[in-house]
Amino acid sequence: MQTSLEFLGTATTLLRLGPFTLLTDPNFLHRGQRAYLGKGLFSKRLTEPSRQPYELPELDAVVLSHLHGDHFDRIARRELDRGLPVLTTPAAGRKLRSWGFGSARGMTTWETHELVDGDWRLGVTAVPGQHGPGIARHLMPPVMGTVLELSRAGGAPWRGYLSGDTLCRPWLREIVERTGPLDAAVLHLGGTRALGLLVTMDGDQGADLVTLLRPAVTVPVHHDDYTVFRSPLSDFLRACDERAVPTQVRTVARGATIPLAAGERAGGQE
């Protein structure tokens, strides 16, 4: 069962899962441009994305964890196909539809949307997340994580988790209790700070979440693209090494593609 991730930058990836191709959290701003984060806050992009919308392959859907300027930016709003299904939170779905994205679908927690191609099925399930601590969560847009379950008639499913911009919380254990063991997890890290508060996982929280969910493969993203990111990738790698976390960490450079199956390495090596 072929599963891979191409990293475009920030939390933007192309997921190729069997016959399906998904785009996640589309952020195409160029180096030096600013993303609007709400409440009068901006952050400058430090990196260049590896693709622009006109360079994308044909897509089956977009998965959007939440509506922030570093996850769905003005370039995405202007240039993405407005007929694409965008699977996101109810709040983001309403706003996207008002912008003309008529197929945007707001999903409640634990709701599943299914894509079908012959005997292939891809379930996209919205799972919980929390973008800010305590009362600060009300200052941030609602966020969702996502579990993707790829299956084909007669075969065992592959299951992957996209964290979205969540903090690590013990109740996230419910994700694997309800959906099953994870073959892969893509974690949004960076230790983002807004108004002095931590609003995305830093390296230690990322290692906590890996320990909690125990995915076979973990891919860290969302850690060096913006000035609001304060916890570099090295923090996460150090924490995972010190704790001997129960996962295989796979880092990926912008523009590179890696497999998401535990027994497969880049280039298809077992």
Image (cartoon, helix red, strand yellow):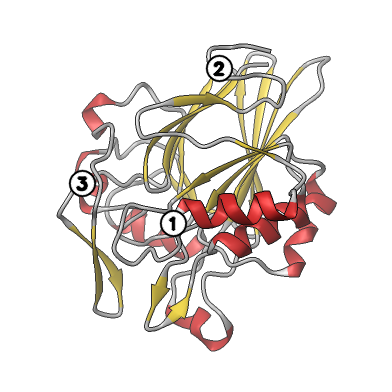
> Measured from the top left, where is residue 181 in percent x and y?
81, 41
Check disc 1 and report the residue beneath it. Answer: 232
Of the two numbered discs 2 and 1 in the rendering, the one whose residue sits closer to the viewer: 1
User: Splitting the image into 4 quarters, where does residue 3 fall?
Assistant: top right
> Measured from the top left, where is residue 138 in percent x and y?
49, 82
Q: Secondary structure at mark 2?
A: loop
Q: CA distance from mark 3 to mark 1?
A: 26 Å
Could you tell me the amino acid type at mark 2? Pro
Using residue 36 as the reference point, say whether residue 197 is left or right of it: right
Which residue is situated farthest in the left direction here? 32
Could you tell me the amino acid type at mark 3? Ile
Task: State the mark number for residue 19.
Answer: 2
Could you tell me the amino acid type at mark 1? Pro
Q: CA distance from mark 2 to mark 1?
A: 34 Å
Proximity of marks 3 and 1: CB atoms separated by less than 8 Å: no
Using residue 184 as the reference point, say whether residue 176 is left or right of it: right
Residue drawn at (52%, 70%) of the image = 131
> First in sequence: mark 2 or mark 1?
2
Residue drawn at (82%, 22%) of the image = 156
User: Splitting the image into 4 quarters, where does residue 212 fall?
Assistant: bottom right
Of the two numbered discs 3 and 1 in the rendering, the one whose residue sits closer to the viewer: 1
> Measured from the top left, where is residue 60 in percent x and y?
46, 28
Q: CA distance from mark 2 to mark 3?
A: 27 Å
Using residue 257 as the reference point, say whether residue 168 is left or right of it: right
Task: State the mark number for residue 197.
Answer: none
Location of the N terminus (image quadrant): top right
Task: State the mark number for residue 75.
Answer: 3
Location of the C terminus (image quadrant): top right
